[in-house]
Image (spheres, rainbow, N blue to C red):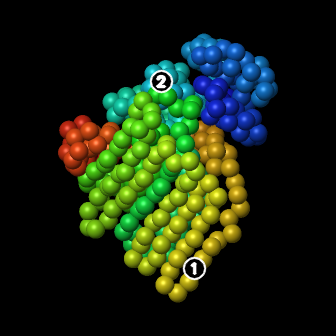
Amino acid sequence: MIRVAVVGAGFWGSNHLRVLRDIGTVELVGVCDVDLARAERAAKKYGLQSYFKDFREMLEKTRPEAVTICTPSTTHAAIALTCLDHGCDLLIEKPMASTVSEAIAIIDRMRQAEKEVMVGFIERFNPAVQHAYSAIEAGQIGEVLLFYSRRIGWWPERIGDTGVVRDTAIHDIDLATWTFRQLPNKVYAMCGRLRHSQEDHAQIFFSFGDGKSALLEANWLTPRKKREMHVTGEKGVVTVKFIEQELVIEKADQTTVPNIKYTEPLRLELEHFTQSVEKGSKPIVDAYDGLRATLLAECILESSRIKSPVDVGEVVKSLGLERLKGY
């Protein structure tokens, strides 16, 4: 049994507790939240004996082998560094960190501790996405040329410490770089703030060179929630509807709609995380993926600020992150 603790007992932390409770190889040993009453309610609901206000006390008293961090993004780095010092493998909900420097600090500490950090890019575990990427890897649509994503809907009221780029578009930032297996050469973005304290709508363009590009649309303004992705290759198009877990593969001579069994992505994600901890293996979504997405989020916001494209290669070079250019 793997001893697992959860930091944060809000909306997403409660979901982690619900799923982890039902994984047979997991022993839930503690939950903490700055709101002690909320931690207590979560502990009672999911059958935990131990709940805390201070995550440091939880680490000392429960000695978890692994921790999932489900707190506001501005707190991720400080919590992660302390958990790594206590010898824990981590799953950090997206975004991994608020800044590139924080993400680098997490990776440096991870390497020192010889532990693994997984980042909660849950769409990687969506069954429709997994089927889509299997089709792409098998060459069903030929060489990939274009990526388009649309992630729109009302503002999630629980989000208060970050804007739509780091909270919402971050999923598609990860998927776009995963699709092309590289960072874009240039980023151009227009973001705006209409109703919220930080940006609540964004139109993002990535250039990967050789005619390859990605267009990402995200907002917290549209009354109906939509989540979709289109990947265009030289021989066809793959379309994914994330919420419905639907996949369509269109080619010149046929259209295929695979029958995909609905499975909760969070369950698949947490099962993979706990299996990685058990085996001592590297997770398929790691801290470097988190750093790439954090880096590109900063480039997007900078491009919007200066109203001009940002050269990603120059940013990578200035930060000494040349190792991030490829996968």
Q: Is residue 118 left or right of residue 112?
A: right
Name the residue located 71 percent from the left edge and 61 percent from the top edge: 261
Q: Earlier in the sequence, mark 1 or mark 2?
A: 2
Could one spot residue 275 in this view of the protein?
no
Question: Which residue is at a point 59% across and 66% down the rendered structure image?
Answer: 247
Within-10-Å neighbours for mark 1: few <14, some 14–19, many 20+ = few
Q: Quadrant of residue 184?
A: bottom left
Q: Position of residue 13 (x, y in %)?
A: 63, 31
Which mark, by number, is residue 255? Answer: 1
Q: Residues within 10 Å of mark 2 (few under 14, many from 20)?
A: some
Mark 1, secondary structure of its residue:
strand
State yes or no: discs 1 and 2 in contact (Cβ < 8 Å).
no
- Residue 200 vertical position relative to residue 261 in the rendered view, above or below: above
Query: Disc 2 residue type?
Result: Thr
- Residue 277 image position (x, y, % from top left): 60, 38
Q: CA distance from mark 1 to mark 2?
A: 46 Å
Q: Amino acid at mark 1?
A: Thr
User: Which numbered disc, 1 or 2, marks the residue closer to the eye?
Assistant: 1
Give the answer, above or below, for where 274 lies relative to 158: below
State the residue in front, 137 or 184: 184
* 23 with respect to 318 (left or right): right
Name the disc covering residue 75, or none.
2
Q: Which residue does the image show at 40% across and 33% down from the upper left?
A: 198
Q: Percent from the top left, x then y, of residue 67?
A: 59, 29
